[in-house]
Amino acid sequence: MILFDSMVLIHAMQPIPAGKDEKLRDIRTKCEASRDAAERSDIIYISAVSLIEVGRGVPDAESESYQRLYSKFYVLPVDAAVAQYATEILKVHRSKESVCRKCLGPKKGEPCTVCNNQRALVQRVNDAIIIATAETNETIDVLYTYDDGIKYFSGFTVNCTIKEPPHPFGALFEQAEKKGRRENGAMDGQEIERGAEPESSGEAKAAR
């Protein structure tokens, strides 16, 4: 079974952008892959945390795209096993990095692209809960995500694989898109580097 991260669902629900700008091409590819993966799934398994994040991140909860996918949601709860595993992840994270004792986010921040207020690069708690939801549920063997925070915690997974949704036009098209982004100096976000500090991402991401 596949667990869908919030970011994948938000890409699946938003309009597919047009244009030849490299950033728009990257978003369009993610939207197409996310929508295809969601549409092909009879049941969309998500964490309870993702239900909140998707509700905040989608502009129009009454839209047809939202309601169509929402009807297929199967929400996995944050039970004792998930909470305990997430706690262990955050303990290891806190021991390795300089983090705030209250929010467990890194003390280093960056300005918000909208309001210019300082924000943490990644809010770790939600990411840890989503990882723990996938890892402690025996039926989940794949976690779809574009979230660098989720990828950052990929070293804590044993029973499930973290990866991005496959492109609906096939692997060759996906490789061509990746090559195009590299040749144009864009960041290649397809490869997951376990334990590597994630880059921040502001595109189509729910506020955390």
Image (tube, helix red, strand yellow):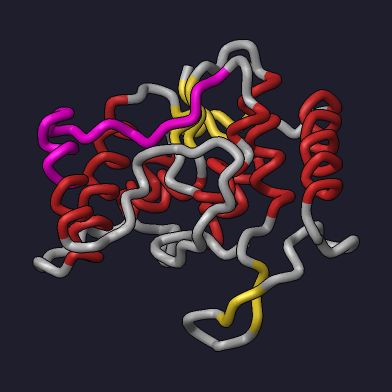
Give the image quarter of residue 156: top right
Identify the residue at image location x=18%, y=38%: 174
User: Residue 191 in magenta?
Assistant: no
Q: x, y percentage for residue 141?
A: 52, 16
- Residue in view at x 81 percent, y 39 percent: 92
Quarter holding the C terminus?
A: bottom right
The correct choice, above or below, for 147 with respect to 102 in the image is above
Residue 41, quarter of the rendered image: top left
> Number of callouts in the render?
0
The front one of 183 and 115 is: 183
Residue with the most extreme top position: 138
Left or right, residue 84 beside residue 181:
right
Residue at 90%, 61% (x, y): give it.
101
Q: x, y (%) of residue 26? A: 24, 56
- The percent position of residue 132, horizontal first and vertical second, equals 70, 30
Task: Locate residue 205, reporting x and y percent.
Answer: 47, 60
Q: Is residue 207 left or right of residue 188?
A: right
Instruction: Please tell me which residue lies in front, 105 or 44.
Output: 105
- Extreme residue in the bottom direction: 116
Q: Is 168 colored magenta in this rendering?
A: yes
Query: Residue 166's quadrant in the figure?
Result: top left
Residue 181 lies, with reference to residue 145, above or below; the image says: below
Bounds of the magenta segment:
160-177
